[in-house]
Amino acid sequence: MSTRTKPEGKRPTRRAVVKGAAVTLGAAAFAKAVSPVAEFAEGLTVEQFLRRHYKELSEDDKREVLARIERDTEAEYGAACKVADPPPLPGVKFAYAINLSKCNGNGKCVEACHRENNHDRDTNQSYIRVLELEKGSMDLEKGNTTYDHAVPAEGKDYLPVQCQQCDAPPCTAVCPVEATWKEPDGIVVVDYDWCIGCRYCEAACPYHARRFNWKKPTIPADEVNPDQGLLSNRIRPQGVMEKCHFCLHRTREGRLPACAEACPTGARVFGNVADPASELRWILANKRVFVLKEELGTKPSFFYFFDD
């Protein structure tokens, strides 16, 4: 059953959940927790605040939302853009594999993600972290993401980490308003207009792959990526969660994610795991692959391997 089908029953409203949180936390704690959301909400119209969940939007509703985002982007950032909403492709289950024998920590994937996804320039945000580890170590807690020396450094290994697009994602299970879910093509997405910024998903993710917008993103007009997706790289508002979405505005149109396209060493392999003839399936069948934190049972769609 497609996740785009209008669900049975009534979804919890953002207003109801926010009110419930206020009662549970107490006035002072609640005010502190939602202050970024409150600042953002001051700029919303009643219609925007009460907008229906993505899955409940009619095609006419969706066209209005896309047009509104395009108008707002031009008004707020001085950049014209085109926002689309490409649907999941039938018979496709996206997955990723990284050859750690080829990854040298150059960080081009991080930079490409930053530019492609219209991240805040002040914080230099990205959905990807490249961990520098002691050679032979898999202790992620001791990984260094702020190294600034020439790479590859002697005695070091490199491990890129981003959303693992889990088949059993703990992040979606904890969202009180169902603002995040897994699409039929394997991509876990966020409805930025429905998210209340409670950050439960951030706490639930064992891969530290979720990001919170503490402020309105700062992006110069000439750096705004105009090719945008409703559930992907549109400029996110203050006070909401965001995450890697496998560049669905690209991949659902037959292109590679920006990070894979930018990798100079060929370490990144992206494809359709449902296709027996794909390079990804060959890797899974012929290489000794592993996933991060397998013991947690999250069933990642993100694999790692070494050359034999």
Image: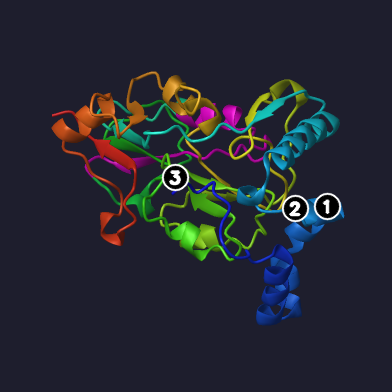
The label number, if any, that marks residue 215 in the structure image: none
2 and 1 marks in contact (CB < 8 Å): yes
Residue 250 locus on image (x, y percent): 52, 26
Q: Quadrant of residue 220?
A: top right
* Residue 45 belongs to magenta span: no
**Mark 3 nearby-residue class (10 Å; few <14, some 14–19, many ≥20):** many
| Residue at 27% from the left image edge and 48% from the top image edge | 138
Identify the secondary structure beneath mark 3: loop
| Residue at 73% from the left image edge and 38% from the top image edge | 60
Tell me the mark number nearer the camera, choosing from 3 and 1: 1
The label number, if any, that marks residue 163 in the structure image: 3
Q: Earlier in the sequence, mark 3 or mark 1?
A: 1
Instruction: In the rendered view, tell whether residue 160 sits above or below residue 253.
Output: below
Identify the secondary structure beneath mark 2: loop
Instruction: Report the Cα–Cα distance between label 3 and label 1.
Output: 32 Å
Residue 120 locus on image (x, y percent): 67, 38
The amino acid sitting under disc 2 is Arg
Q: Which residue has dot 1 on it?
A: 47
Q: Which residue has dot 2 on it?
A: 51
Identify the secondary structure beneath mark 1: helix
| Residue at 75% from the left image edge and 53% from the top image edge | 51
The amino acid sitting under disc 1 is Glu
The amino acid sitting under disc 3 is Cys
Report the span colored magenta: 109-136
Q: Earlier in the sequence, mark 2 or mark 3?
A: 2
| Residue at 41% from the left image edge and 52% from the top image edge | 207
Q: Quadrant of residue 162?
A: top left
166 sits to left or right of 282: right
Q: Nearer the viewer, residue 36 or 90?
A: 90
Instruction: Report the Cα–Cα distance between label 2 and label 3.
Output: 27 Å
Instruction: Report the Cα–Cα distance between label 2 and label 1.
Output: 6 Å
